[in-house]
Image (cartoon, rainbow, N blue to C red):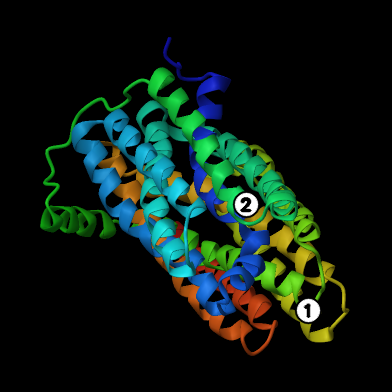
């Protein structure tokens, strides 16, 4: 029995596929200091398990979209899930921090497929406001996993040590892969004849990148996600360091941040029906800028409470919940016959931005915890500025 469009079951499976990436990063965040201690590694060295993941994730996104446009969604999905499951086992068995970094790179290559193709399946099956609402619904489901993952990771770290979170990723991904193999139908209607050679992929990307609608959506998403990844990569060190939280408390505080994201995806569904995509982007980028600026201001004032980081980040992630589903769909919308490639290119720009911000934050945190809110404020303001300029140009052009 295959899953059918317009059913909650299909939305749930696609939403869980998009949650694979957050699961791969968020669940082991409370373990980062313990990993550093276990291997005698520095903070910046251990944070390479995050930044390397993002770089490899970006590389994976280059290939999965074009391959799925040519050969279909299902075979590419099955291959990527297989790689992810095997790599998660390798992460759990890593003998050194460098071994963990390499295993994380393979895990990222596997994780890129389900995330890219979940969005592509939505573009295959739905159009217009219906597609936007489906992406927002998937975003809500995707937000539940990161809400649970850090707290679960904190418990696993406390009870069993840092390897337990990767064992849990292995088991969860194996079950989801089985559901996809059995239940998800092929959704590609017309196979692309675009070349899948390296040069052919680059030419395809160049064609997609010339589209102004794609550029606007990709730029807004990349800048916004940079601020989110700054928090993902730096929060465990800041909250467990200067603010003195335990791994479990850090996981619970991360749940509050994810509540902001889920709230954004729910509210955006209402805004879509009233003002459409432009209104969603205006509201979302306003929340991004406000959250970043408030966090930086509170940090500079110095309240001494971890809430000066967590509460403004809730506002920032509310903005993420608004703009990410909309910009992902907007980037694919002009290219029904190349939806996989468009999804890949949008993902590459987003992950590359995140990796660069993560590296900068890792360097900055070695000097001051203020590097974290500074990066988030800069990302929010940049996304807000690009959105306003782009929407104004679209309205007058």
Vertical placement of residue 41 versus 279, above or below: below
| Image quadrant where residue 142 sits | top right
Q: Which mark is residue 167?
A: none
Vertical placement of residue 321 versus 234, above or below: above
Q: Is residue 140 left or right of residue 69?
A: right
> Which image quadrant: the N terminus?
top left
> Which image quadrant: the C terminus?
bottom left
Q: Residue at x 62, y 82 (%)?
A: 365
Q: Which residue is mark 1?
A: 242
Q: Position of residue 377 (x, y in %)?
A: 64, 75
Circle 1: element type = loop
Circle 2: element type = loop
Q: Position of residue 386 (x, y in %)?
A: 49, 68
Q: Position of residue 16 (x, y in %)?
A: 54, 35
Cα gap from disc 1 to disc 2, whole angstroms: 21 Å
Earlier sequence position, callout 1 versus callout 2: 2
| Image quadrant where residue 73 sits | top left
Q: Residue at x 75, y 70 (%)?
A: 239
Q: Position of residue 359 (x, y in %)?
A: 49, 76
Q: Which residue is mark 2?
A: 27
Q: Is residue 278 visible?
A: no
Q: Residue at x 42, y 47 (%)?
A: 111
Q: Is residue 149 left or right of residue 339?
A: right
Judging depth in this view, the residue of 174 and 286 nearest the camera is 174
Q: Residue at x 49, y 37 (%)?
A: 173
Judging depth in this view, the residue of 173 and 393 nearest the camera is 173
Count neighbours of disc 2 (C-alpha within 10 A) and say few if under 14, some if 14 to 19, many if 20 or more: many
Q: Is residue 340 visible?
A: yes
């Amino acid at each position: 029995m295959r899953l059918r469009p317009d059913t909650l079951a299909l939305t749930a499976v696609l939403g869980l596929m998009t949650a694979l990436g957050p699961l791969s990063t968020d669940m082991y965040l409370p373990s980062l200091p313990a990993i550093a201690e276990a291997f005698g590694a520095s903070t910046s060295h251990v944070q390479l398990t995050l930044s390397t993941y993002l770089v490899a994730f970006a590389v994976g996104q280059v290939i999965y979209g074009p391959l799925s446009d040519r050969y279909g969604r299902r075979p590419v999905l099955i291959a990527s899930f297989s790689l992810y499951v095997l790599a998660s086992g390798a992460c759990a068995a890593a003998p050194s921090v460098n071994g963990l970094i390499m295993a994380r790179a393979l895990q990222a290559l596997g994780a890129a497929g389900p995330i890219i193709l979940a969005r592509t399946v939505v573009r295959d099956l739905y159009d217009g406001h219906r597609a936007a609402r489906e992406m927002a619904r998937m975003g809500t489901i995707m937000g539940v996993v990161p809400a649970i993952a850090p707290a679960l990771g904190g418990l696993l770290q406390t009870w069993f040590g840092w390897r337990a979170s990767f064992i849990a990723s292995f088991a969860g991904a194996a079950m989801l892969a089985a559901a996809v193999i059995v239940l998800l139908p092929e959704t590609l209607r017309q196979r692309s004849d675009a070349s899948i050679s390296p040069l052919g992929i680059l030419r395809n990307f160049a064609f997609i990148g010339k589209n102004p609608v794609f550029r606007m959506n990709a730029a807004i998403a990349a800048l916004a996600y940079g601020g989110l990844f700054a928090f993902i990569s730096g929060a465990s060190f800041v909250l467990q360091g200067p603010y003195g939280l335990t791994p479990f408390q850090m996981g619970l505080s991360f749940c509050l941040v994810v509540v902001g994201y889920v709230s954004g995806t729910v509210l955006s569904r209402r805004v879509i029906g009233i003002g459409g995509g432009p209104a969603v982007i205006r509201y979302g980028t306003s929340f991004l800028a406000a959250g970043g600026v408030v966090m930086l201001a509170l940090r500079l004032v110095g309240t001494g409470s971890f809430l000066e980081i967590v509460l403004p980040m809730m506002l920032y992630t509310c903005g993420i919940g608004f703009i990410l589903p909309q910009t992902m769909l907007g980037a694919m919308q002009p290219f029904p016959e190349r939806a996989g490639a468009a999804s890949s290119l949008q993902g590459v720009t987003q992950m590359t931005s995140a990796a660069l911000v993560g590296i900068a934050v890792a360097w900055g945190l070695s000097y001051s915890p203020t590097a974290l809110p500074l990066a988030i404020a800069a990302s929010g303001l940049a996304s807000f500025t690009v959105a306003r300029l782009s929407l104004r140009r679209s309205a007058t052009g």
